[in-house]
Amino acid sequence: MLLAFSVAPFGTGRVDGSVRDAVAGAVREVRVSGLPTRTTSMFAELEGSWGEVSDVVKRATEAVQPFGSRVSLVVKADTARL
């Protein structure tokens, strides 16, 4: 499957509203996954099985959680049989 997602915290408490550190933690999880990936300014894309990609999304979301009171997660997936 091919999955694209974005994740960001809300309620960071930062005066500048920056989510840079939180997003860096999520990107780290994507890069260490070992799956084929592509990271853009809007989404991280992963390619793998349901289990593999959902595990990475979960870890990336968990990496962002300490940075805010809430987390926004947007997911788009292509599950075509190959």
Image (spheres, rainbow, N blue to C red):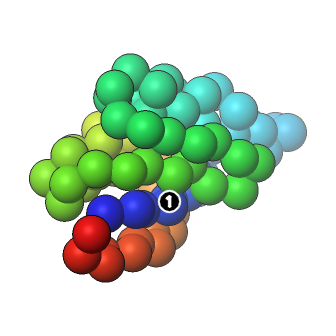
Q: Residue at x 30, y 42 (%)?
A: 56
**Residue lying at 55% horizontally and 57% vertically, measured from the top left:** 6
Residue 39 in the image: state x and y as whole percent.
Answer: 63, 42
Quarter of the rendering containing residue 75: bottom left
Q: Is residue 7 visible?
A: no
Q: Position of residue 52 (x, y in %)?
A: 20, 46
Mark 1 belongs to which amino acid? Answer: Phe
Q: Position of residue 44 (x, y in %)?
A: 55, 49
Q: Which residue appears farthest toward the front when viewing the image?
A: 82
Closer to us: 11 or 21: 21
| Name of the residue lying farthest toward the right | 16
Horizontal side of residue 15 vs 81, given as left or right: right
* Mark 1 Cα shell of 10 Å, populated few (<14), some (14-19), many (≥20): some
In depth, the one of 17 and 41 nearer the eye is: 41
Q: Residue at x 40, y 62 (%)?
A: 2
Q: How many marks?
A: 1
Residue 24 placement (x, y as % from top left)? 60, 28
In the rendered image, the vertical position of residue 80 relative to residue 26, given as above or below: below
Q: Which residue has dot 1 on it?
A: 5
